[in-house]
Amino acid sequence: MTEEGIKKNRPSRILRGIALTLMIITVLLTIIGAVGTVCIAIGAENYKGMEALVPYKWLYKIFVIIKFIVGIWGIHVIYTLFKGREKAYRNSLIVLIIGLLVAAAQMTTSHFLRGKTMPVDMRFYVTLVTLIVFLIIRIPSIWPKVDFTWSKENGSKSTVAGTAMIISGIITVTTPIWASSSHITPDGYNLVNEIAGPLLYGGISFIILGITVLLYSFRISYRQKLLNTRKQISHVSIRN
């Protein structure tokens, strides 16, 4: 592809990158949400301020199961998106729609029982935005340019994956902060601290891995540009 062609398709490529990054973040939030809900689903009676949820632990167990299924399936779907597999886009929509419905159901339940919906509503809105972006991509005039088959770029996958990993790592590490509003017990204890260790180590690992992938991507891009420059110089020399 010529430099002019690359510049022409850059907005669509950026949209694809945004869509994939949002998809990764959505799946991550779904899994974190499932892990966080386990404590309530199993032992809501052990935490102050959660007494209203005790009769509905069975419902929260269902939420946990569905969220884990959606999260695990979402990981597979992300893999197929990066591999350019058939039906990857369709499966992405299914994951997003199911995730959105489950988030809405849990958000409504938490609102009526506790009067609080964070951090479920954050997951709901992120999933909604991701779904909207994926629907925009399917507009006939945009779809052919987005190129989910990755037929024309080599370094784009690494750039998108690395960026998404870093953002996901930051979200994971800061979970005890942005999720604390609905997890503080009457005696001031933050329930998110129950899984603070895994969140910290997992988040740092994501950030380090993301930086590594980005450096690898930049290295490939630099070598490709250097190779193209040499070819152009060689072509000009032959013509002269």
Image (spheres, helix red, strand yellow):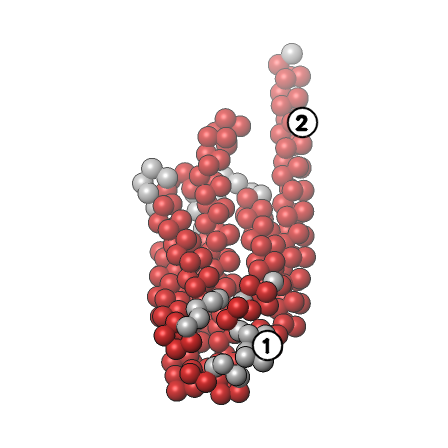
Q: Amino acid at mark 2?
A: Arg
Image-based side of 9 in relation to 223, left or right: left
Q: Is residue 68 visible?
A: yes
- The mark nearer the N terminus, 2 or 1, is 1
Q: Position of residue 57 (x, y in %)?
A: 42, 84
Answer above or below: position of 97 versus 83.
Answer: below
Q: Position of residue 233 (x, y in %)?
A: 66, 21
Name the residue nearer the viewer: 208 or 129. 129
Q: Who's the residue at 39% across and 60% down the image?
A: 96
Answer above or below: position of 94 versus 46.
Answer: above
Within 10 Å of the Cα at label 1, are there few (<14), some (14-19), or many (20+) other Cα atoms?
Answer: few
Which residue reaches farthest left? Answer: 140
Name the residue nearer the viewer: 229 or 108. 108
Which secondary structure lies at badge 1?
loop
Q: Amino acid at mark 1?
A: Gly
Image-based side of 59 in relation to 7, left or right: left
Q: Which mark is residue 162?
A: none
Counting the numbered discs, the total is 2
Residue where numbered disc 1 is placed: 188
Query: Gap between marks 2 and 1, in whole Å?
Result: 64 Å
Residue where numbered disc 2 is placed: 230
Q: Position of residue 197 (x, y in %)?
A: 65, 72
Q: Position of residue 191 (x, y in %)?
A: 57, 76
Which secondary structure lies at badge 2?
helix
